[in-house]
Amino acid sequence: MLKLPVYLDYNATTPCDPRVLEVMIPYFTAHFGNAASRQHSFGWSAEEAVDVAREQVAALIKADKTEIIFTSGATESVNLAIKGVFETYGSKGNHIITTETEHKAVLDTCKHLEKQGAAVTYLPVNADGLVDLQTLEAAITEKTILIAVMYANNETGVINPIREIGAIAKKQDVIFMTDATQAVGKIPVDVQQDNIDLLALSAHKLYGPKGVGALYVRRKQPRVKLTAQLDGGGHERGMRSGTLNVPGIVGLGKACELSGAEMAEESNRVSALRDKLEKALLALEETHTNGSITHRLPHVCNISFKYADANGLMMGFNRRIAVSSGSACTSASPEPSYVLKAMGLSDDLAHSSLRFAVGRFTTEEEIDYTIRVVTETVHTLRELSSLNS
Ligand SMILES: *Cc1c(COP(=O)(O)O)cnc(C)c1O
């Protein structure tokens, strides 16, 4: 029997994989030590576990374990990266380049810094949702200290040309940060080949627990320095003080190990499910996909249903399907998605769009059911609106 509602909101958060939870549990009870306690075995075993996790996270993004700073999640990682660069490299310049379609963690951090004297360029994106490399390169000035471009977009799943952006940043001697929260664990990410200097990731987007994440901070060629945003005991090489969330970190490490080991297989499985769903929805009249379909994460599609308002659709789903319109953090507001607007969609179309994100625990039966419910609801809604007009 199908269990309702069907969860298709894996970009908002993922359930913790039971294999992840299992390795976390002993670190709440038997191994409860403080990883900073250097004088006894409770501390040592916590420190050892953190060390293993640091290696697991580093391995997934081809970093060295000494380059991983544990945080409370991607929002904190992004804040530390952007504010930390701005405060450290202020003597070199005050210019930051980012994009209009970043997550609020990046946009609101940049807005905050504008009040402190930062000059921020918000690059537009094309109709596919992607950054244009020439526009990016042309925006760089001698005052530019940071380029912050997300790896993959949370609303559309489109993947930016990260390797090309990294090459431009390196050539121009500008630090390159990427919010890779949606990409890590889903597609191969390589901080070396991509010339990434700072990378934010979060456990709860890759089947780990909520409230833990990491920031990759490049240590050589170049060595990136960050001003700490939390002062205290000097944990995490002085960049992030505070007692480490050992169970959470152990979970993040395991989640990274599993995603790395199962990526190829999982990616095939979820993309087959996504493609089946998308194909069926596009077979309805006046529906289309938002964003590039060639540069896209394997598990996401964002679809516009012309003449059918997203809120009406959700109501019609009647709690049988859990999806999102706009980003989760802003979906309470009536404003249409700023991401879709930046791609040139009208207010109407942006208001008629839904994001479907399948994941590790999605079944074919759930996809078939979703196709039925969405098709039915779209038809009903359009009949109603044509009766009303
Ligand atoms: C979820 C998400 C974040 C925020 O991550 P938290 O760990 O919840 O703070 C940042 N950026 C992107 C692209 C996201 O999808």
Image (cartoon, helix red, strand yellow):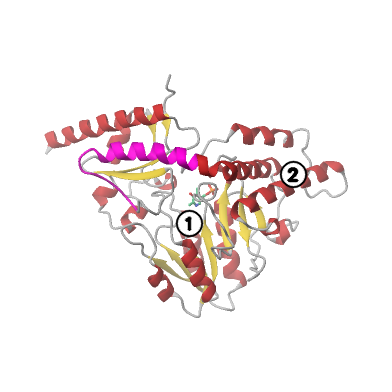
Quarter of the picture containing the N terminus is top left
Q: Position of residue 316 (x, y in %)?
A: 29, 30
Mark 2 belongs to which amino acid?
Ala
Q: Dot 1 corresponds to which residue?
A: 151
Identify the residue at the far top of this view.
1
Circles 1 and 2: CB atoms closer than 8 Å = no
Q: Position of residue 145 (x, y in %)?
A: 54, 73
The number of discs equals 2
Mark 1 belongs to which amino acid?
Tyr
Q: Dot 2 corresponds to which residue?
A: 49
Taking the image as shown, residue 193 lies to the left or right of residue 351, namely right
Which label belongs to residue 385?
Answer: none
Q: Dot 2 lies on which element?
A: helix
Q: Residue at x 57, y 43 (%)?
A: 259
Asked if residue 51 lies in the magenta stretch, the reply is no
Q: Residue at x 64, y 66 (%)?
A: 226
Of callouts 1 and 2, the N-terminal one:
2
Q: Residue at x 40, y 54 (%)?
A: 295
Which portion, as a residue range, is magenta?
Answer: 266-291
Task: Tell me: residue 303, above or below residue 142.
Answer: above
